[in-house]
Amino acid sequence: MAIKKSALMKRLIVTIFSLYFVIAVVVSFIHILFEYKNIREQIEMDLKSIHISSSSSLSAAIWNFNSEQVESLIDGLLTLQFVSGAEIYNNSDGFNITKGDLYSSSYITYAGPIIYSDGNKERAMGALKLNANQSIIFDRIKVNVIFIIANAFLKTFFLSIIIFIVGYRLIGRPLDLLATSVNRLDFDNVEQIKKSKIKTDENFFKNKDELTYLILAYNKTLDKLMSRTSQRDVARKELEDKNLSLKGLVNQKTLALQGKVDELNSMNEKLSILASTDPLTGLLNRRCFFERAGEELSRLKRTNKLAAVVIIDIDYFKSVNDQYGHPAGDAVLTVISKILKSSVRKHDFVARFGGEEFAIFLSDVDIDEAIMLADRMRKNIQENKVVFKGDVIKTTASFGLSMMESGSKDIHSVINDADKLLYEAKSSGRNMVKY
């Protein structure tokens, strides 16, 4: 009688993992699609925000025919993390400038007019185009570990369901016959053992698979059971001894496993901290700031209270890096971050947005209290001296303050307002608070 080796198991494995593969592909595709779309929209919003915040400075420089300042502002834009190209065009005075990469099809582009206003009349100074490389989208997708883990759990969940359903259809019901026989067994009654044997006939062997030969082996086992009854008590005693030994071993392994679990939990906590903080200053990073600020905005809408967002930029920070070196610049950033952190209240939070830019969320404050806190931080920075390798470095900072109310649209609009005020402070002489 020929045996179809592993016929049932092969059908089960092929079925389970075929469905698993399809589900994994679909879930991964949806994940990548949504992430790509969301990140692209965020970059486009960031480019628009940069255009809005830099337009007034560029228009003033062009109106004053200050080509050196125009060049400097364009160079400053290119130092931003994701700006890869900038162009001023359609300017009638010859201030058409192109820097960086602007003509690749793999870039995200935003263009808008440059308008100069003297208070009475607005004049078109040309247009500004900004480019961002799409490769930053893929870099941001890579760090989205949370969604990948959730995706893995989702796949595992569906795989478990598939195993249960398919396993029952292919194995569960055929095993009912064997289970019924086993339930009738009485190892102390020889006649009952004989009655528990499963009857087999010609039809029984039509489907030759593992279950067929399992039942045959089961019947053979029952045939041998009587001859081994006398050995049962001895075997039972040995088994009890082994169970005690195994229980002790399991306890040891359980304690060791618990230690590993505690270690893993500790590592996960550290990873969570790293994912939400800036490695240089220890402050919150940009992503974490937006998350917490969004939560605060929801709270404000429920409680009808006020809050403020302050955007801070270190004045002439590039000169510090150029004159003293980037390590000195890092030291300045570290000292200023400590000043900002120590100047706010316990329920406020501070973040480093990138480069020399910081953001502060002041909870439950009115405009007067927010201005007082911001000006106190400005004075603390002005009065502080950073000593680095014998050099004394003095710095100042410009502040843009925008109030957040229960009717505020979203955190992005509030930050955009604060950014505009920051650039107004910059253009008005720096080292001041604009609100």
Image (cartoon, rainbow, N blue to C red):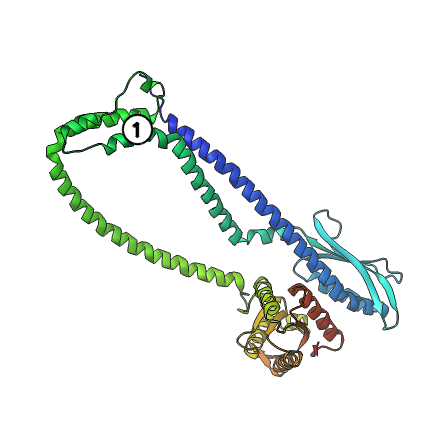
Q: Nearer the viewer, residue 123 or 163?
A: 163
Assign the N terminus to one quadrant of the image: top left
Residue positioned 36% across, 32% down in the render: 172
The answer, for residue 65, to whether it is visible in the render is no
Mark 1 lies on residue:
177
Please state which of residues 381 and 244 is positioned toward the viewer in this rendering.
244
Q: Position of residue 158 (x, y in %)?
A: 47, 42
Residue at 71% x, 52% y is: 108
Q: Residues within 10 Å of mark 1 (few under 14, many from 20)?
A: few
What amino acid is labelled 1 in the image? Leu
State the image quarter where residue 205 is shown.
Answer: top left
Residue at x 22%, y 52% (from the top left corner)? 248
Farthest-out residue, left: 230
Q: Is residue 240 above or below residue 189?
A: below
Horizontal and vertical percent for residue 246? Answer: 22, 47
Residue at point 69% right, 60% down? Answer: 46
- The answer to which quarter of the image holds residue 365 is bottom right
Is residue 181 at all visible to an observer of this figure? yes
- Give how far across and how far down residue 30 sits, in percent: 58, 44
- The image quadrant where one finds the C terminus is bottom right
Instruction: Tell whether 197 sits left or right of 75.
Output: left
Q: Report the front residue among 4 and 200.
A: 200
Q: Is residue 308 left or right of residue 264?
A: right
